[in-house]
Amino acid sequence: MRLFQSAMRASSPLLKTRSFATNASELRSVVFKDNLRTVQMADAKETVLPGGRDLFPLLPKAFEGIKQIGVIGWGSQGPAQAQNLRESLEGVSDIKVKVGLREGSSSFAQAKAAGFSEDKGTLGEMFDVIKESDMVVLLISDSATVNLYPKIFPLIKKGATLGLSHGFLLGHLESVNETFPKDINVVMMAPKGMGPSVRRLYVQGKTVNGAGINSSVAIHQDVTGNATEIALGWSVGVGAPYTFYTTMADEYKSDIFGERCILLGGVHGLVESLFRRYVQEGMTPEDAFKNTAECITGPLNEKISHDGIKSVYESFKGEDKIIFEKAYTAAYTPCRDIIEEVYDDVACGNEIRSVNNAVARHDRFPFGKIDQTYTWKVGEKVRAARDGNFVMNPFTAGSYVAMMMAQIDVLMSHGHCYSEVANESVIESVDSLNPYMHARGVAYMVDNCSTTARLGSRKWAPRFDYILTEQAYVAVDDNKIKNEAKIMSDFKNHKIHEVLAVCSSMRPSVDISVD
């Protein structure tokens, strides 16, 4: 039974645009049956699992048959998930959490500092850990996964569970017409935020029955009959306050896509373009930064996080509301143009191939810094001189919200379930990522993420900068905005506002604090 089906766009014959709507009957659990909830989101129903530390005693049942969980990798997600799982299982189970790292890896010292060690049997060489584990949580980089899966797959025990926190590997396998081994479970638990956020909110929430970062789970392959229990247990154990259901294919498309747009690359390009515009209009550089990055990560971020997107528009009066409308209607279509292109490139495999090719060049062309422009040098001074007062600039707000809404519309047009649309376009941005930019600038946000995200952000940020400068702002200045009335009407009456009202009740119990 399909509970939700959206109109779908097929902009290229190469795209596989299947709609995987969340079905309340698809997510069933014996272990967590008393905790699952069916929620109404606009015109669709979705099944969610509220988490919390009071569910930790159920983890042994969820992980039945599992004696060792091998967490492979110590990048963005590895440290957070390994430590969170270890602490969640302490006192309720004798399941061992063992970290597996590449032989000779410099991360051995970091893992030891976090309490994992060879002497305790909780730290070892990655391939040895894979062979001996009943559940393998593979958290090495996407590019390393693509390079190593031919060696990893034969090592996984028959009937064991392969856990992924991203569907990138599935996207690669599909592009080369390969599959996962048929004799193992394959599940995904994808936190809706970077690894440091997963850990920080878990620690912050110790006194309030949880916190952590919301996650999505997918059951891609179930050979033992309990893959759903394992995936849900994994999510609860990592600390997800709410777990949503998706598919691995939908996750990798929405995730790779989202970080190139509003989550990372898009907002970076927006800040750069607006900063230059405001300076050219006569603002001091310091005021220009306050009206761009500081506005987005400060009052605008807080408003969206707690009250939803529409509340931003409703907070403006008189001339400021008109300015918001002009900025929104001018930016929406150019942003959607780029965002559609990003989705197309992810869905047809081009972006996955681009990541693999870029990583292959890294020995010759390593990552460069992204906070060395004048914009971010000014930002360092502004952050150092903060006095607690922030500016809510209506032009900045309108432009930012336009990009966010364009991303929402593209995901909906491809049939992604509402919770995934909200998480990948709004919640991950305001509750996980923007606080890092607020604390230390764009590089601190982007470069705390995965290699795939860092590459995508660097690739697409200039495209957003260019199209906003060349099309959106010119349309405002020349008073040549097209379809203003319809674009604003669509915004005011959009179903995402109802969805976010529901999602606002399913957010972490504490706001993240970033040093």
Image (cartoon, rainbow, N blue to C red):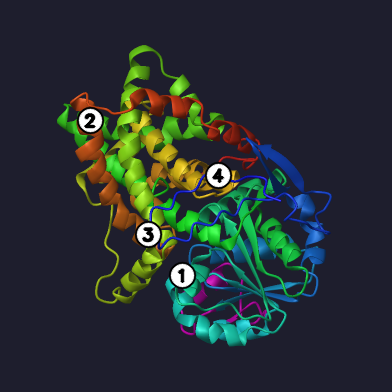
Q: Quadrant of residue 43?
A: top right
For marks 3 and 4, the one nearer the N-term is 4
Q: Quadrant of residue 503?
A: top right
Q: Which residue is mark 3?
A: 345
Label at residue 424: none
For marks 2 and 3, the one nearer the N-term is 3
Q: Measured from the top left, where is residue 42 in percent x and y?
A: 62, 35
Q: Nearer the viewer, residue 88 or 161?
A: 161
Label at residue 475: 2
**Mark 3 neighbour density, 10 Å: few (under 14) some (14–19) many (20 or more):** many
Q: Measured from the top left, where is residue 315 in percent x and y?
A: 46, 20
Q: Are marks 2 and 4 in contact (CB under 8 Å)?
A: no
Q: Report the amino acid beneath label 2.
A: Ala
**Tag nearer the camera, 1 or 2:** 2
Q: Measured from the top left, where is residue 336 in percent x and y?
A: 36, 42
Q: CA distance from mark 3 to mark 1?
A: 17 Å
Q: Which residue is mark 1?
A: 142
**Tag nearer the camera, 3 or 4:** 4
Q: Quadrant of residue 319?
A: top left
SS at badge 2 = helix
SS at badge 1 = helix
Q: Judge whether 331 appears above or below 459 on screen.
A: above
Q: Report the amino acid beneath label 4.
A: Ser
**Mark 4 neighbour density, 10 Å: few (under 14) some (14–19) many (20 or more):** few
Q: CA distance from mark 3 to mark 4?
A: 21 Å
Identify the magenta region.
101-124
For residue 225: magenta?
no
SS at badge 4 = loop
